[in-house]
Image (cartoon, grey):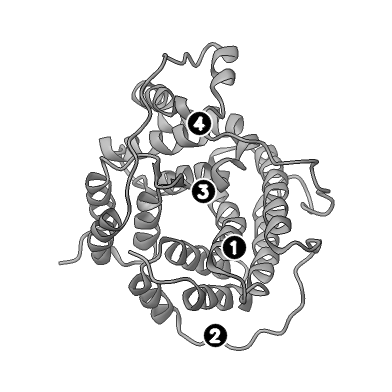
């Protein structure tokens, strides 16, 4: 019998309990995120095997030594620790305490608005890992110890790599139709950057993977919206656009268009189930995560670019775990 979603996720977290924040050379750990995405794609039975392959195929770095306790009530103290990678273990202890003493919803409502301005850090992986951990929580009942721990690790990594968007803030004109329209803004954002990514098919895998995060960070932000007020969504969309525009400009070395291109896209090569099966068989964590993100966006606001870009990444990125 195939495991349930919560069984598959908790088993993955248990297998990954000694895998912390980064792997060589200085890349963010992707195991928990990809495991959750694979479960969301309905492939719970494949999660454990993928996790074991992922663990074996990467050299995982230990967490930094703890330095000093961070007090959440002391704003000057915790702000001074933002963006200090060597404080990741101190941040982890803070969020472990927060999640033990408060409802997880309260922790999200307090800290995600504090961290959103630093979502550029770690190529947006702090935001993305936190969002995957949030979506992994059960719809009914209290989170398990492992689920709370992964949420704490996501928040801790986000705080430790906190970094505002680089350079001058690009224009955000037209990002939102109205202050509460964050969901529609994310749809426009992901379609726009999916077209940009698709147009870079001839690029090498590393630049392609960098561009992937312009989409997955925006899709991940949807997970926070039900817990936070509309003004958070408006602000988050502006920050995401700044970060994604900076990534795309760096990778493509050409001006980033203000709207999605109008390229003609043909019919998808594969049905949804086959696309998912191919992503899981491919094994690369970015392929798995982008496939899940694109299928989610396509359900919300259908656009052929989503399936096309997921298919392209499967062709262009070498197989992974």
Q: Residue at x 31, y 67 (%)?
A: 43
Residue closest to the eye, 3 or 120:
120
**Mark sitting earlier along the chain (3/4):** 4
Q: Pointer 2: residues within 10 angstroms few (<14), some, or many (20+)?
A: some
Label 2 vs label 3: CA separation? 27 Å
Mark 4 or 2, nearer chain start: 4
Tell me which label, 2 or 3, sits earlier in the chain.
3
Q: What residue is pinned by disc 4?
A: 160
- Residue 273: which disc? none
Which of pointers 4 and 1 indicates the residue nearer the eye? 1
Q: CA distance from mark 1 to mark 2?
A: 24 Å
Residue 144 in view of the camera: no
Residue bearing the label numbered 2: 268
Q: To which residue does mark 1 refer? A: 207
Q: Is residue 56 left or right of residue 156?
A: left
Q: Secondary structure at mark 2?
A: loop
Q: Which residue is mark 3?
A: 223
Mark closer to the observer (1, 2): 1
């Amino acid at each position: 019998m195939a495991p349930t979603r919560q069984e598959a996720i908790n088993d993955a977290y248990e297998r990954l309990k000694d895998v912390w924040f980064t792997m060589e050379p200085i890349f963010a750990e992707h195991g928990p995120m990809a495991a959750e995405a694979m479960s969301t794609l309905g492939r719970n039975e494949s999660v454990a095997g993928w996790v074991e392959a992922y663990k074996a195929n990467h050299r995982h770095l230990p967490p930094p030594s703890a330095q000093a306790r961070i007090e959440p009530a002391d704003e000057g103290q915790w702000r001074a620790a933002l963006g200090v990678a060597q404080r990741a273990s101190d941040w982890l202890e803070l969020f472990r305490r927060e999640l033990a003493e408060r409802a997880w919803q309260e922790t999200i409502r307090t800290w995600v608005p504090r961290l959103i301005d630093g979502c550029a850090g770690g190529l947006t992986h702090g935001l993305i890992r936190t969002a995957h951990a949030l979506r992994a929580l059960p719809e009914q009942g209290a989170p398990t110890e492992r689920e709370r721990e992964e949420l704490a690790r996501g928040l801790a990594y986000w705080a430790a790599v906190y970094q505002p968007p680089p350079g001058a803030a690009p224009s955000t004109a037209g990002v939102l139709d109205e202050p509460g329209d964050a969901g529609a803004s994310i749809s426009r954002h992901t379609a726009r950057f999916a077209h940009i990514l698709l147009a870079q098919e001839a690029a090498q895998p590393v630049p392609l993977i960098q561009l992937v995060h312009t989409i997955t960070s925006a899709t991940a932000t949807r997970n926070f919206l039900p817990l936070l007020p509309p003004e958070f969504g408006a602000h988050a969309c502006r920050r995401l656009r700044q970060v994604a525009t900076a990534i795309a400009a760096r990778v493509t070395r050409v001006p980033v268009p203000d709207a999605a291109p109008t390229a003609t896209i043909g019919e998808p090569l594969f049905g949804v189930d086959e696309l998912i099966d191919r992503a899981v068989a491919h094994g690369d964590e970015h392929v798995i995560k982008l496939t899940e993100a694109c299928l989610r966006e396509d359900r919300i606001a259908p656009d052929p670019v989503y399936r096309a870009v997921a298919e392209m990444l499967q062709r262009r990125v070498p197989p992974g775990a």
